[in-house]
Amino acid sequence: MSKIFVAGIGAVSPAGWNVAALRDALDKGEPLPVQTLARPGWEKPLRARLVPNPPARPEFLAHPRLRRTSPITHYAAAAALEAVTGLRGHPAAKNLRLGIVACLQSGCVQYSCRFYEEVLKDPATASPLIFPETVYAAPTSHVAALLENVVVACSMVGDPSSFLLGVALGAQWLENNCVDACLVIGAEETNWITADALRHLDRSAIVAAGAGALCLCLDSRWSVGIELTTITDAHTYSAKLDRAQAAQAMRQQLGNNSPGDLLCDGLGISPRTDAAERAAWGDWSGSRVSPKRILGEGLMAASAWQCVAACDALAEKNFGAANISLVGSNQQAVGARILICPPPRRRATSSHELTGHIDHRRERRVGPGQRARFSPGIISECRLAWRPLQSRKRRQAGAGES
Amino acid sequence: MLFPPTSSPAAPPRVVVTGAGIVTALGLGWKPNAEGFRVGCRAFRPVSLFDVSRQRVKVAAEVDLPATLPPSRLNYRQLARLDRAGKMLVLAAQEAWQQAGWESAENLPLVLGTTAGGMLHGEAYYRQALRQPSRQRQQATRAIHYQPQVQARMVLDALNYSGPITIISNACASGGNAIGHAFDLIRLGQAERVVAGGYDALGEMVFSGFDSLQALSPTVCRPFDARRDGLALGEGAAIVNLETLESARRRGAEILGEVIGYGTAIDQHHLTQPHPQGHTTLNVMRQACANARVTPEEIDYVNAHGTGTVLNDNSEALAISEWAGRRAATLPVSSTKASIGHLLGGAGAVEAVISLMTLREQWLPPEIEFETPDPACKFPIVQKPQDASVKVVLSNSFGFGGVNASLIFRRWA
């Protein structure tokens, strides 16, 4: 069995159009501002966290295939391009065969609503330009055309936990030598109907839009120093296995935590929705981050953000490993684990790295004695999980300057 | 674990089909469908499911669903929440499951292809939200049940088993990709048995979409005919139960056929149009043959994607002609969409089951309305019902977005 590495990450979120914006928002720990969406027939608007306009029009929008596309394609494309940036700059990665797995839950809702509204008014005049953009496979197709060297692609639909099924499919393609690298993208756009539907299922949730992307590879030279080590079974909900039991089963497969690990969970702000995941990780004593609390309920994009945030935390902060917990809304619970691995391409930020001891042994070296270096995660307030790390980083930066 | 896989077989196991279920406008189940396809029966009629008075085309191949579904483990609430697509899916899955003789199981993967899933729930949600904004009744149920993974869970509950669900939505290639993915899971040792298939129901939005594109035939759907003028839509579902040969033999199961090859790739030419020369189609057919270790000379019948649109059929005809080479002159090809219409996400799976029928029963499905071959067709189109010696069949599926899939099946004798 080959090792699977992360070659790059990308994100578009209500925080902005790249991973740095996502990282900044999570570091600040403050829920992002909420916008309103007008709902036909209602005076009171619905709430959402929308992706801000980019500072400048992205160059890729000049591509002819992206001319009529809806925001979900823009988000997916931007995240994908960011995730393959490093790979494209690598001389050994020229002419590589790329795969794309795009995961969606709501999919292309903006054009779907627009087209169906036209149909309800008069099908004889419904726009043929819009209809093709309503299919789940449209964003995948556009991103493939944009990247050009894509040889195989798959659009997967499901609840947000399906993002890790997409990662598993990408790993399978790599292992099978179908591709040299594989982009796994989670993307969503939003409009009033998505916000309205979500309101029926979780009144406190605030719908959000965006995308996240992981670029996976087998070649450690292309890696950003992160290895995918585990994706648990998909614990499907059924009459025999409720959501809480599925979350618990996923948790058990990820094994006991080490104090130096990070947990990137899917907790939001709804006690009822979060109960299963909260219970499953009740014994977690390490740091944790909950992107949905800051960014909103981005459905499949939120799962992708979790994975991106976990990778980014390993690359930028002082964690040896991270667990990713995806407890889906109505399908399954799936978890994953990623590790720092040699050779790191990132800037050294810890004493372990400065002495070169950053391989898998590091997990065991971070023992109880070092636990104080990592603040215990406080579930109710994500920002507290990040703060000490920020401070330490700043201290290091300050020492470097002096 | 999904990753790393728990085991990796020394040699890929052979994958056989031990159960098949099919629902189309020709009927519910293998027998009425086999009888219909064998004679090239056409199942089109005026659309009754929604208003088509303002549409350019007014016919489709609708399924006659029974008033009540056969007994299953679904309770009355679950049954009440199944839309047409969900009912067709459960019917096909029940038939396949019974034929395979499988029993309650855990960790048995379900891989489905669909383009619309529970879109009928979604349409109802949208109409009510627009027309009666303050009325909330049934909206929460619709918001949940329009999602295909919830329909997939109904299959698990109906058949009393559990396992991971994968929903592939590569537009009209979805069903073919679902079976291909299931084939890969078994070949790679990640599962010993998999339930796979595809489904889609006729809906107002999708019908209007194809009508707006003027992709629907205002006359008769005639794939590969020089006078073809578009596709016809249909609805349906098909499920196959795949398992390793070893597992089937251990159980003493009846084997319906063997899956021996799968190829998939993406055509980046255009969102809705194939490459004019069919490069990707050629690629996936070659991939599938290489995977199956067969040559075009060994293929006895091609169940083409053959939608009946000018662009698709021209591109596919060029690809088949080039791929088959000298074999093309004698290679029987037909598109069963002439009988039941285009089933979108269900098409690849339904056509896989039709391929199994031809292998089991040794006939070729004709296109009885076919008259004038397109010059791009270097191969004969099956025009009349005929018995034939069929040992290996290749089935093509292509979708909006450019994903192409080819599956190859072999007769089990």
Image (cartoon, grey):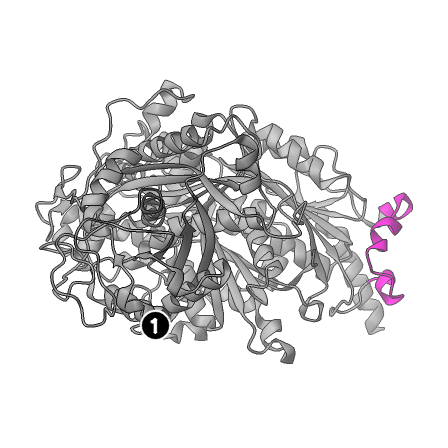
Which quarter shows the C terminus of chain A?
A: bottom right
Asked whether residue B142 is in view, the answer is yes
User: Which residue occupies the foreground of this view, A109 or B302?
Assistant: B302
The subunit letter for the residue under badge 1 reads B
Screen quadrant of the N terminus of chain A:
bottom right
Residue B380 placement (x, y as % from top left):
22, 63
The correct choice, above or below, for B75 with respect to A133 in the image is above
Q: Does B40 lie within the magenta span?
A: no
The residue positioned 32% from the left and 56% from the top of the image is B301
Query: Callout 1 environment at 10 Å: few (<14), some (14 to 19), or many (20+)?
Result: some
Residue B141 position in % (x across, y down):
37, 30
The structure residue drawn at horizontal position 40% and vertical position 58%, both measured from the top left corner, is: B405
Work out whether residue A17 or residue B209 is closer to the camera in this orientation and state it.
Answer: B209
> Position of A283 compared to A265: left or right?
right
Looking at numbered disc 1 in the image, what kind of residue is underneath it? Gly
Q: Which of B410 and A390 is in front in this view?
A: B410
Q: Is residue A400 above or below residue A159?
A: below
Q: Nearer the viewer, residue B126 or B5?
A: B5
**Left or right: B194, with A288 as reference point:** left
Residue that protrudes farthest toward the right in the picture: A369
Q: What residue is shown at x 55% (from left), y 46% (from top)?
A: B186
Indicate the quadrant where residue B271 lies: bottom left
Disc 1, SS: helix
**A51 lies left or right of B56:** right
The residue positioned 51% from the left and 24% from the top of the image is A239
When asked about the image quadrant of residue A6, the answer is bottom right
Residue that carries the numbered disc 1 in the rendered image: B325
Residue B369 shown left or right of residue A342 in the figure? left
The answer to whether any part of residue B278 appears in the image is no
Quarter assignment of residue B303: bottom left
Q: Is residue A364 one of those drawn in magenta?
A: yes
Residue range (magenta): A350-371
